[in-house]
Image (tube, rainbow, N blue to C red):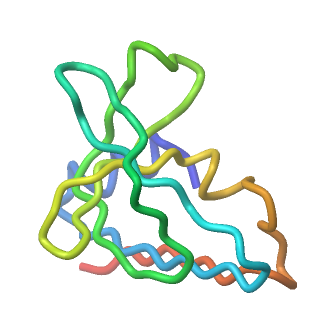
Amino acid sequence: ISMSYLGVAYQNDIPVIMAFNRCDGTSLRLYEKKGTTLVQTNELCSSHYFVVTGTYSNPNMPDKHFLTISTWGEERYICLEEYLYGKGSNLFSSYMEITFSK
């Protein structure tokens, strides 16, 4: 998955739904916007579906790519690199799915 692929989905009004599950007990960090930067929340996600609603560039972390998500009706952010390559992200300990549907 790449940010450009997600951008094409948004430009063509294609919903993006992501699933996340870690069987090894690790969690995905959720972030929220404070001013123009993102800060980590106290919320952690170990098994969840969420809708991607956009992308965000965090000026404090220019080497990271963030996705704007809607989870339980709240706007949050996840780091794409943490989602894809975080601790425990391998085929035997994770379930991750990205769905594009029109």
**Which part of the image, by quadrant, shows the C terminus?**
bottom left
**Quick check: 77 above or below 90?**
above
Where's residue 32, x and y in %?
Answer: 28, 42
Q: Nearer the viewer, residue 75 or 102?
A: 75
x%, y% of residue 82? 63, 50
Quadrant of res 84: bottom right
Residue at horizontal 59 percent and vertical 21 percent from the top: 63
Q: Quadrant of residue 94?
A: bottom right
Location of residue 55 in the rendering, given as x and y in whole percent from the top left corner: 32, 41
**Relative image position of residue 37 (x, y in whole percent):** 30, 22
- In the displayed structure image, the side of residue 17 where residue 85 appears, left or right: right
Left or right of 47? Residue 17 is: left
Q: Is residue 39 above or below residue 9?
A: above
Residue nearest the viewer, comparing 56 with 22: 22
In the current view of this chain or complex, which residue is farthest to the left? 73
Choose between 97 and 102: the one closer to the eye. Answer: 97
Numbered marks: total: 0
Query: Is residue 61 rendered to the left or right of residue 36?
Result: right
Residue 27, above or below 78: below
Which image quarter: residue 86? bottom right
Q: Residue at x 81, y 67 (%)?
A: 88
Q: Quadrant of the N terminus?
A: bottom right
Q: Residue at x 48, y 64 (%)?
A: 44
Asked if residue 57 is positioned above or below residue 28 in the image, the reply reads: above
Residue that appears at 21% across and 49% down: 11
